[in-house]
Image (tube, rainbow, N blue to C red):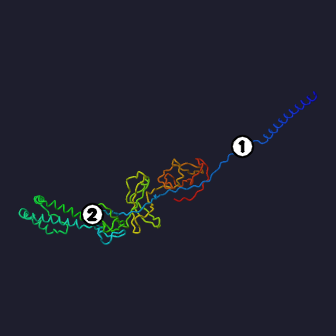
Amino acid sequence: MSEKSTLKNSRKWILIVLGIVILFGSYKISQTIANSKPSKSRESKVVTKEVYTLKVTNGSYQVQIPSNGVLNAYKRISLTSRVQGVMQTIEPLFKVGQKYKKGQTLVQIDASDFKANVIAQRASLYNLITSVLPDLQLDFPVAHSNWRIFLQKFELQKPVPALPLMEENVKLFVSGRGIISSYYSLQNLEQSLKFYSIKAPFDGVLVAANTTEGSLVRPGQELGEFIAPGNYELMVALPKSYVDNVEVGAKVSLKSVDADQTYQGVIKRINAQVNTQTQSVAVYIQVKNPKLKEGMFLEAQIEAKEFDNVFAINRGLLDGDQQLYVVVANKLELKRVVPLHFTETLAIVSGLENLDEIVAQPLIGAFVGMEVLPSVITSSK
């Protein structure tokens, strides 16, 4: 038993020593491998990016402000009745699209009852003046002659003539007899009699008719609308920031969307009030053309203020501090500019010098001092 125990212990120690030798040998081998491949420091390479650039050529820039709107007649009236009566049938009929000349009757309302009352008032005034003629002949012979001439001009079917000139004492005399008050009451009735006939104030076309012949017309009733064709205005709403660049008298190019035709207009009025909801200002453009019709939708290009010594660039090239990158000796530098006007895609700026080379496209990762390889492209303002 003792010999087996001794043999077993010897084997154990041999295995331990062998394991230590193997571990030590592995360590030495790994060290040798590590020392045989020394680390090499990586050399940093400077990457030069190719960028597209523009050569600055300053010049003038005519601001074009796009907008649109619906065409409305410049001369337009609403026909409203001030009296009551039955609308009579006259030629031409009161129909939409009917043309009328200036002074031609548009609407005729039956005034037979009212006219009879006016004639009665004229007769009453005539009798009143006749009754005072004997007194005038005795007290005021000169005035008597003037009043007789007045009566000779007096006709019951026509408007009452103007009163004769009177001295103060004569005026007091006839006023005391109620002649002057009756005269002006009659004039008021004659004025109202004119309202039974509505005449065209200018050459035009009836574009709306809300009643027909034979209908009962009441005071305040809207009868229709009357316009002068060929003369129109277009109302466009511009942002308040644009209005400072627009002046009365500026030319406007108008384009019809459906017919692809262009017309020339001019700015006539600019509202002094800003719309509180849209923060825009109404600008009115006048255009004259017989081919135009009310209600047409037109696109407008307004010629606003012209800037000198400016350059047009892509809006995306400006940063928050109104700076952009320029190339100097193949390196990027920032240059501050002054934006004067913005469109949807462009910024009109001043502060650049002729032949300055600016970066034409936004450059990711750009920084001051970055080396670049510029490639000049042709600019078009």
Q: Residues within 10 Å of mark 2 (few under 14, many from 20)?
A: some
Which of the two residues, 289 or 180, is positioned nearer the viewer here? 180
Q: Position of residue 365 (x, y in %)?
A: 60, 48
Which of the two residues, 238 or 188, is positioned nearer the viewer here? 188
Identify the residue at the far left of this view. 138
Q: Under tag 2, what secondary structure?
A: loop
Residue at 11%, 58% in the rendered image: 176
Q: Which mark is residue 84?
A: 2
Type of residue at label 2?
A: Gln
Q: Which mark is residue 41?
A: 1
For the residues labelled 2 and 1, say whether their Cβ atoms are less than 8 Å apart: no
Can you tell which quarter of the image residue 193 is in? bottom left
Q: Residues within 10 Å of mark 1 (few under 14, many from 20)?
A: few
Identify the residue at the far top of this view. 2
Which of the two residues, 42 or 195, is positioned nearer the viewer here? 195
Q: Position of residue 164 (x, y in %)?
A: 14, 64
- Count of labels in the image: 2
